[in-house]
Amino acid sequence: MTIFNSSDAFNPEDWVELYNSSDSSINIGTWKLKDEANDHVFIIPENTILSAGDFIVLCKDAIAFTNLFPEVTNII
């Protein structure tokens, strides 16, 4: 396992990108993303559709992420 820690000058907080490599849309609504701590759970909003060949970014702090990656608009 590789752990990456951002520098203080460039820190978009925690984020992960989900990519749909299939030829079909996928309903990822109510999927859960979590780590080893049971109280660290993110539930993707109901009826979230990830289209074929598309991606979505789940981020801890949307403002911090957008400040560093303004070209990415499909975030939760």
Image: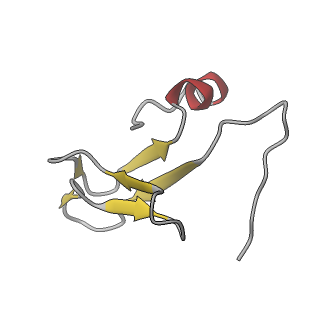
At a point 54% along the width and 71% down the height, the residue shown is 36
Between residue 23 and residue 75, name the one nearer to us: 75
At a point 39% along the width and 50% down the height, the residue shown is 55
Q: In the figure, 53 relative to 13: above or below?
A: below
Residue 25 picture quarter: bottom left
Residue 56 coordinates in the image, percent (x, y): 40, 46
| Quarter of the C terminus within the rendering | top left
Residue 38 picture quarter: bottom left
Q: Would residue 14 be found to the left or right of residue 10 on screen?
A: left
| Quarter of the N terminus within the rendering | bottom right
Extreme residue toward the front, this view:
39
Residue 60 coordinates in the image, percent (x, y): 52, 40
Q: Would residue 64 be found to the left or right of residue 40 on screen?
A: right
The chosen color scheme is: secondary structure
Residue 74 coordinates in the image, percent (x, y): 39, 35
Extreme residue toward the left, this view:
47
Q: In the figure, 55 relative to 1: above or below?
A: above
At a point 85% along the width and 40% down the height, the residue shown is 7
Q: In the figure, 43 relative to 73: above or below?
A: below
Q: Would residue 14 be found to the left or right of residue 49 on screen?
A: right
Between residue 67 and residue 45, name the one nearer to us: 45
Residue 4 picture quarter: bottom right
